């Protein structure tokens, strides 16, 4: 078992220079032709010391949790079985008064499938039908995107009440089997400055174009953040993650006290030691609204 090692690799950032693309149509070939600034980085393996990281300090947290639904994972049963499980995890870990899973994505295809499509002569608008590891530095929602998600999932009256107290968006990421390749890296939120995050609107394709995004959001799209490279950014991952090893990722937090982590960029990456592996990574991420109705903003 590998541990306490740094992986030398490259991450795909959004270019700091050049024209800015303000919208991506998710689930299309064009989304995989986004501009890339590939930078060499070191990523620290946290295995054996994962307990030192905390969601509200670093923006991520590793926990142990045995799910009864991973071994027999079926996309059709995720909402029935894994949504309530995820909501209970978040309430127990964060002390939230309420949690609501609003979407999920299961990634089970090798990245080479979309690479081939991106290199093809297919038009940008052609829909993709596979979910692969996201090999680009990003945060799932910007601040405006988080508000869009909230308003897409509760009534206007309920939103007015919930916006008066602290709330957040947290992803629960879990491998469905031991991760063979494309591990997930997370950045220490304190090392990634706001000026190095670019807001881009992710538009969801119509259901007639790509039904695979039906589970991604109830709305028509949302603001996202793409990371730009800067010295001093710190990256971490856990080697050989197993289904009972779960990663919590902070995507948004309404608390602005200067101490609480509000978002953490993350990305899948190529570990040079497993570059030859053909087996695809299989994982599921559940995106959750988390409410702290007993805490001020």
Image: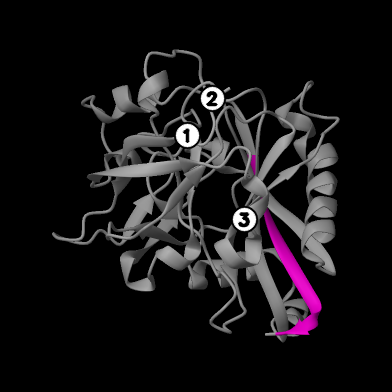
Q: Tell me which corner region of the image, top left, top right, bottom left or bottom right, holds residue 161.
A: bottom right
Q: Give the x, y percent position of residue 167.
A: 69, 73
Q: Tell me which corner region of the image, top left, top right, bottom left or bottom right, holds residue 240.
A: top right
Q: Is residue 34 left or right of residue 225?
A: left
At horizontal 57% and vertical 78% (from top left) the residue drawn is 259
- Judge depth for marks 2 and 3 and give the one in front: 3
Q: Calculate the distance from the C-alpha at mark 1 to the C-alpha at mark 2.
A: 8 Å
At horizontal 72% and vertical 86% (from top left) the residue drawn is 164
Q: Which mark is residue 53?
A: 3
Q: Give the x, y percent position of residue 3.
A: 54, 31
Q: Specify which label sits upstream in the sequence, 2 or 3.
A: 3
The residue segment tinted magenta is 285-296
Secondary structure under the numbered disc 2 in the rendered image:
loop
Q: According to the image, label 2 marks what residue?
A: 281
Quarter the N terminus occupies: top right
At horizontal 46% and vertical 35% (from top left) the residue drawn is 5
Q: Nearer the viewer, residue 76 or 232?
A: 232
Secondary structure under the numbered disc 3 in the rendered image:
loop
Assess whether residue 294 is covered by the magenta stretch: yes
- Judge depth for marks 1 and 3 and give the one in front: 3
> Marks 1 and 2: CB-CB under 8 Å?
yes
């Amino acid at each position: 078992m590998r541990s306490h090692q740094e992986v030398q690799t490259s991450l795909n950032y959004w270019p700091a220079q050049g024209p800015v693309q303000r919208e991506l149509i998710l689930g299309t070939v064009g989304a995989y032709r986004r501009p890339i600034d590939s930078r060499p980085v070191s990523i620290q393996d946290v295995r054996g010391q994962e307990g030192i990281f905390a969601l509200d300090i670093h923006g991520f947290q590793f926990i142990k949790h045995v799910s009864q639904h991973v071994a027999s994972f079926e996309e059709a049963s995720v909402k029935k079985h894994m949504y309530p499980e995820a909501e209970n995890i978040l309430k127990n870990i964060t002390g939230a008064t309420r949690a609501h899973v609003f979407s999920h994505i299961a990634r089970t295809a090798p990245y080479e499938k979309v690479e081939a499509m991106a290199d093809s002569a297919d038009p940008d608008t052609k829909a993709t039908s596979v979910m692969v590891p996201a090999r680009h530095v990003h945060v799932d929602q910007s601040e405006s995107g988080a508000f869009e998600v909230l308003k897409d999932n509760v009534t206007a009256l309920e939103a007015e009440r919930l916006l008066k107290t602290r709330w957040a968006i947290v992803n629960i990421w879990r491998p469905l089997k031991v991760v063979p390749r494309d591990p997930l890296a997370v950045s220490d939120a304190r090392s990634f400055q706001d000026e190095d995050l670019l807001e881009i609107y992710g538009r969801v394709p119509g259901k007639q174009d790509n039904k695979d995004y039906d589970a991604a959001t109830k709305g028509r799209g949302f603001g996202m953040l793409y990371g730009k490279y800067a010295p001093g950014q710190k990256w971490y991952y856990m080697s050989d993650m197993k289904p009972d090893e779960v990663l919590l990722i902070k995507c948004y937090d309404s608390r602005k006290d200067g101490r609480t982590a509000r978002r953490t960029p993350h990305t899948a990456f190529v570990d040079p030691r497993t570059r030859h592996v053909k087996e695809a990574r299989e994982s599921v991420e559940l995106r959750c609204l988390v409410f702290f109705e007993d805490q001020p903003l």
